Image (spheres, helix red, strand yellow):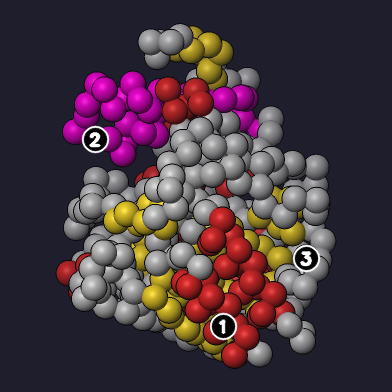
Amino acid sequence: MHDDVTRSIDDAVAGGVPFVIAGTTSASKTTFLHAAGRRGAVDDDMAEAAASDTVIGVYSVTKAFTTTVALQCVEDGILNLDAPAREYLPAIGELEVLEDLDDDGRMRTRPPVRDITSRMLLMHTSGLAYDMFDPRYAALARARRRSGSTTPLADSLRTPLLHDPGARWTYGTSLDWLGLIVAAVRAQRLDTVVQERICAPCGMTSTSFDLRPDMRARRAVLHRRRLDGTLAPVTVEPPDTPELDMGGQGLFSTVPDVLALLRVWLGDGSAPGGRVLQEATIERAVQGMPGLEVTPLASAAPGVTRDAEFFPGLRTSWATSFLVTDEDVPGGRRAGTLSWAGLANMHYWIDRRSGVAAVWATQLLPFFDPACAAGVAAFERAVYAGR
């Protein structure tokens, strides 16, 4: 089985992906790990090979970490998921619903009919969106960039709601706001919370919102696929310390570190260094919300993401910050599997029925790049072959 899994990873690199690092885990240990390709720029003949300890930007895989520390706050009695979120972070209570947007970026808004709650943030029903998936948000983002700012990350969160809180599923910045709430109720930086309450018990050594010197030295180069199919390195360098710890997108990590978090969710919430979540918390969190439709993500920024639809033709739902596959995937994951992905084509799943979780990762834009999508699908088929 491992030979076929390894071959699927090598084939993805041969098919135009700069590198792939992928692995699987049981509830107790990593069961497979392989890296192929080079972590440096494609035009650098001296670029180092990708390795298991290569550091990558995980983008929206950050949401699984923020979800975990938020649920720890619930367990500790300092966060009520159904209380108005403004009770913990007044600024979120200032957001209004967008009713009209002029060509010059001027908005007409109204107060929402109900408060946003932390549960809505976890379920992506707050009304907050992403500019890469909504043309109105994209127009607002362009206006922000023209005006200039010394706090661009904070400014990016001060966006209107696309609908009243609780009305429907809309993928966006909800977990960034939830990260701010966690930081507020803990009275700590979100990175400190993640280090103390996830990284320490799980034995993670290369996960942080900060790009520490030892991590920067192992960081993979992000690439973008041009229209002609060739790859170009993205030359913008992230800062050592971010302006803001963005709970929906800001972490750097490695595949083995992410697998360590997936083990928490695959098993009973425990880790080698202590319990991370109560088993009962996980059992509640993995249940999809009946009737909540997870809609396809139509691209409003083709250079960043292609149109994305997960498992077309199969029933899906949304649990506490995870997509739930409500049917068996032929040749792959079982019904009830949790999953999500990061913008630079990092994908993971947690199949509690089969007892396997997995990560497939590279650093390539746009999201849902066809070569990456094919590589992830081949990897999954190889993992489940014979199961």
Between discs 2 and 3, the one toward the N terminus? 2
Which type of secondary structure does the marked residue at label 1 adopt?
helix
Mark 2 neighbour class, 10 Å CA radius: few under 14, some 14 to 19, many 20 or more: few
- Tag 3: amino acid: Val
Who's the residue at 55% across and 52% down the image?
A: 368
* Relative to 130, residue 346 above or below: below
In what quadrant of the picture does the C terminus appear? Answer: bottom right
- Residue 70: where, in percent of width, then height? 50, 55
Q: Is residue 46 visible from the viewing direction of this image?
A: yes
Who's the residue at 77% across and 87% down the image?
A: 386
Q: Are marks 2 and 3 in contact (CB under 8 Å)?
A: no
- Residue 236: where, in percent of width, then height? 23, 50
- Tag 1: amino acid: Arg
Where is mark 3, residue-wise?
329
Measure the C-alpha gap from mark 2 to mark 1. 45 Å
Q: Which residues are magenta?
A: 140-166
Where is mark 1, residue-wise?
7
Mark 3 neighbour class, 10 Å CA radius: few under 14, some 14 to 19, many 20 or more: some
Q: Which corner quadrant of the image does residue 337 belong to?
A: bottom right
Where is mark 2, residue-wise?
151
